[in-house]
Image (cartoon, helix red, strand yellow):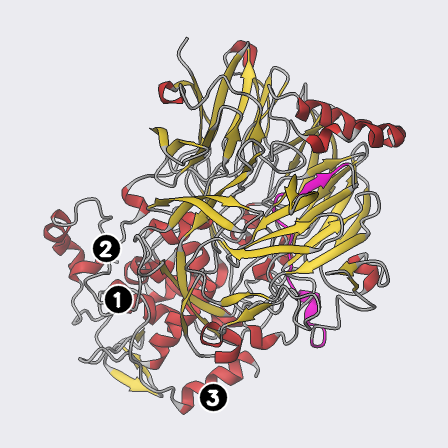
């Protein structure tokens, strides 16, 4: 997918010296892949029905995005680094969440992916059977999208919306607790 | 030199019928011109008698030759040198090269196992491997997928193979193996996948399994004698591996065994530590969770445990107890003692009697350690040997879904596996350390075989109100429990140290520097920037009458995860974020061996 914001990067990159150029710095919150169209049971969606984040002016994040922060740092960060920033061997997921189509993103998490060759030994495992990931996949996705787009910074979001009843019910049903 | 090994000839003769491999390896290790075992010797001292490179001339060190391993990811461990051959290993796919030192490092043979790439993502924290072992004309490789392979050291021909675990359940390997007598002792990784840790002995000639000792479970699984196996001098009693667990949680209880093992030939005991209990959410596993987080002393012949000491009962912070046990004979209170010194992830350095398991010293080896006020050293106390936990930093007492902040050290510990060294000349330990703190929020997780089983979210950052860096390289006095000197480092020191009779201590840094310091003062004498960050261990050998120092570069491992993007303190204001430079501004991937020597 091409996105208009990637074209805006050149200027930002010049000021970043040795930092890796990422898609984050010029993302518009009006991007149709990001902009909130409606809310349902505490979760926010774009007009295409894709999960997205909602950050209030005072920095309060929606509960699912906060939940995604927690689950990311339990399940994903041992390879992909803190805050989705990438490690010496695994890609920065804060960028992948923006660069990849939602359905492609989900597909890689559920089924895994292998890039193995002479120069690369990169393997993403399949998490399809892991409730700690699958029950929170949309949360992790919106968290990474929120950080990748610059809507929230690194580290723990300071303020969050309360957990909705709908969220709790779905969580309990999914985790079997 | 090593009083320990000199005392062993009598014992070895006594057991001569089945001790030939043991004698072979001990002979090789006693020859200071070789580096015949990853740990320098059975005592894990990482000390060399070689002294032609010394504190007066080390500043003149030059690169003698280099070798690219052809693999990009994190390179831990070190090469071995036996005779005229150097053995170099790599991370996954675990290639082994035999280099002919008489022919400028020409490749005599290479061995590359075929492994299912699906093992890669089940390895926590990169695809590291801590190197091969040698004994009795064989090279032992313990692959990522837990296959143990014996190769003919002359030809690279496969002599036998044994499968130690099942990667589809999260069982993997990162560690080297320990050849003892007629056995090869191996461990297992996978504490973050709910693996039940074990140590297993294979027959050195045939590869047949001889015994396996689990870290928790029924007495027959953990190989204890309830009456004679002791914990701080008291019998452990029946069912000690299950009665501090709720229900069947011990079956996925962790306590994996991926550190550097040591062996005392005189006492005929092997020593190692067990890792964290699974999960990282302490509320899901009430009790002390024995025998996770435990120093273990076992008989290598049958695996029977002589004594245990659990350092961190009911872990709440992922302070694995796997770090190496360093064996020394030193005077303490006017008496010669057979000691074991251990620098734990939990930030405490322990000095113990290695024969009886008596606890002698337990002190913080980084002043920022704050989760405990210290260990109860009163043998009459009901809390004897237990660390007193500070409520503010207790993730158990604060509870599930609560973020406990400012805990020091972070989960990677004040020290991880990167091994320390000991100089009998100074009686000091040289310790690579981390200077990192964390926030830790545990929450409920469910177990699925072969899937991560973590249950906590962590944020890590440099120790606040300190020098701003994430590491220190320290000299430690294990008798008095004191830091002698401390060198601040910008990044965690993730490289194994080497002390020599030349009064020099070597270590590597994550930026890629090989550094040499004065063993007495810590003053820097030499540095050279290798092509990639160093997480390997420094080794030395002599060939053709000349001393060489070798180090693997190739950044990665645990250190490459957090540090590649830089660690930040989420509690700092925006101004501080980004103030900690990312490792990726200094180095990139690439496995290479660099060998140093003095100019002719």
Structural crowding at the residue carrying mark 2, measured as other residues with C-alpha within 10 Å and reported as few (<14), some (14–19) or many (≥20): few
**Quarter where residue A160 is shown:** bottom left
Residue that sits furthest to the left in the current view = A11
Q: On the image, numbered disc 3 is attached to which residue? A: A169
Q: Position of residue A18 (x, y in %)?
A: 21, 44
- Residue B444, relative to residue B61: is it above or below? below
Q: Are marks 3 and 1 on the same chain?
A: no
In this orientation, which residue lies closer to the viewer: B550 or B476? B476
One can see residue B530 in this view: no
Chain where mark 1 sits: B
Q: Nearer the viewer, mark 2 or mark 3?
A: 2
Magenta range: B246-265
Q: On the image, numbered disc 2 is attached to which residue? A: B579
Magenta-drawn stretch contains A41: no
User: Is residue B211 shown left or right of residue B172?
Assistant: right
Q: Are marks 2 and 1 in contact (CB under 8 Å)?
A: yes
Q: On the image, numbered disc 1 is attached to which residue? A: B572
Q: Position of residue B253 (x, y in %)?
A: 66, 65
Q: Position of residue B356 (x, y in %)?
A: 76, 52
Magenta-drawn stretch contains B252: yes
Q: Residue at x 64, y 47 (%)?
A: B333
């Amino acid at each position: 997918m091409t996105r208009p914001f990637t074209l805006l990067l050149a200027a930002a990159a010049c000021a970043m010296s040795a930092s890796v150029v990422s898609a984050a710095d010029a993302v518009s919150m009006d991007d149709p892949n990001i902009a909130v169209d409606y809310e349902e049971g505490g979760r926010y969606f774009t007009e295409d029905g894709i999960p997205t984040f909602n950050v209030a002016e005072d920095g309060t994040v929606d509960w699912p995005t906060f939940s995604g922060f927690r689950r990311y740092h339990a399940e994903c960060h041992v390879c992909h680094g803190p805050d989705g920033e990438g490690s010496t061997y695994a890609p920065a997921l804060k960028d992948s969440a923006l660069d990849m189509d939602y359905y492609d993103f989900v597909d890689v998490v559920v089924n895994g992916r292998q890039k193995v060759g002479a120069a690369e030994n990169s393997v993403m495992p399949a998490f399809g059977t892991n409730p700690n990931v699958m029950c929170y996949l949309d949360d992790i996705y919106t968290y990474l999208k929120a950080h990748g787009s610059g809507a929230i910074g690194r580290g723990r979001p300071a303020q969050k919306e309360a957990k909705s009843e709908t969220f709790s019910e779905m969580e309990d049903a999914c985790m079997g607790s | 030199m090593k009083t320990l090994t000199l005392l062993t000839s009598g014992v070895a003769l006594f057991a001569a019928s089945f001790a030939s491999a043991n004698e072979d390896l001990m002979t090789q290790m006693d020859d200071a011109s070789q580096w015949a075992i990853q740990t320098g010797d059975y005592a894990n001292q990482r000390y060399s008698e070689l002294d032609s490179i010394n504190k007066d001339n080390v500043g003149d060190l030059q690169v003698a030759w280099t070798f690219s391993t052809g693999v990009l990811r994190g390179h831990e461990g070190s090469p071995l040198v036996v005779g005229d051959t150097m053995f170099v290993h790599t991370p996954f796919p675990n290639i082994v090269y035999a280099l002919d030192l008489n022919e400028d490092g020409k490749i005599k043979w290479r061995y590359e196992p075929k492994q299912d790439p699906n093992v890669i993502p089940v390895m926590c924290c990169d695809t590291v491997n801590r190197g091969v072992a040698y004994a009795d004309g064989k090279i032992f490789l313990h692959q990522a997928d837990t296959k143990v392979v014996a190769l003919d050291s002359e030809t690279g021909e496969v002599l036998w193979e044994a499968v130690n675990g099942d990667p589809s359940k999260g069982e993997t390997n990162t560690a080297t193996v320990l050849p003892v007598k007629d056995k090869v002792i191996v461990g297992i990784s996978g504490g973050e996948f709910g693996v039940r840790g074990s140590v297993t002995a294979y027959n050195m000639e045939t590869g047949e399994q001889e015994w396996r000792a689990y870290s928790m479970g029924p007495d027959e699984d953990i190989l204890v004698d309830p009456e004679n196996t002791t914990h701080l001098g008291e019998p452990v009693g029946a069912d000690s591996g299950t009665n501090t667990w709720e229900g069947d949680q011990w079956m996925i209880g962790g306590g994996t065994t991926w550190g550097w093992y040591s062996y005392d030939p005189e006492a005929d005991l092997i020593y190692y530590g067990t890792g964290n209990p699974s999960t990282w959410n302490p509320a899901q596993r009430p009790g002390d969770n024995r025998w996770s987080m435990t120093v273990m002393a076992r008989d290598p012949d049958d695996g029977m445990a002589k004594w245990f000491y659990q350092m961190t009962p009911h872990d709440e912070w992922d302070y694995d107890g796997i770090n190496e046990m360093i064996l020394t004979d030193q005077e303490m209170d006017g008496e010669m003692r057979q000691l074991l010194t251990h620098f734990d992830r939990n930030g405490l350095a322990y000095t113990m009697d290695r024969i009886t398991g008596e606890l002698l010293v337990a002190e913080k080896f980084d002043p920022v350690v704050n989760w405990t006020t210290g260990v109860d050293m009163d043998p009459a106390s009901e809390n004897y040997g237990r660390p007193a936990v500070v409520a503010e930093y207790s993730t158990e007492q604060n509870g599930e879904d609560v973020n406990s902040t400012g805990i020091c050290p972070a989960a990677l510990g004040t020290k991880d596996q990167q091994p320390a060294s000991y100089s009998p000349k100074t009686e000091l330990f040289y310790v690579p350390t981390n200077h990192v703190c964390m926030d830790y929020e545990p929450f409920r997780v469910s177990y699925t075989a072969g899937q991560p089983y973590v249950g906590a979210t962590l944020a890590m950052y440099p120790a606040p109100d300190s020098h701003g860096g994430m590491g220190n390289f320290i000299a430690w006095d294990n008798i008095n429990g004191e830091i002698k000197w401390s060198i601040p480092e910008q990044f965690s020191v993730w490289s194994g140290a080497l002390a020599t009779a030349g009064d020099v201590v070597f270590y590597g840094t994550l930026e890629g520097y090989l550094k040499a310091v004065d063993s007495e003062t810590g003053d820097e004498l030499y540095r050279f920037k290798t092509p990639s960050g160093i997480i390997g261990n420094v080794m030395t050998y002599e060939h053709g009458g000349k001393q060489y120092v070798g180090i693997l570069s190739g950044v990665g491992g645990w250190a490459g995860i957090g540090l590649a993007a830089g660690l930040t303190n989420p509690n700092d204001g925006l101004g501080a974020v980004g103030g900690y430079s990312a490792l990726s501004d200094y180095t990139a991937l690439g496995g290479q061996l660099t060998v140093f020597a003095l100019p002719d």
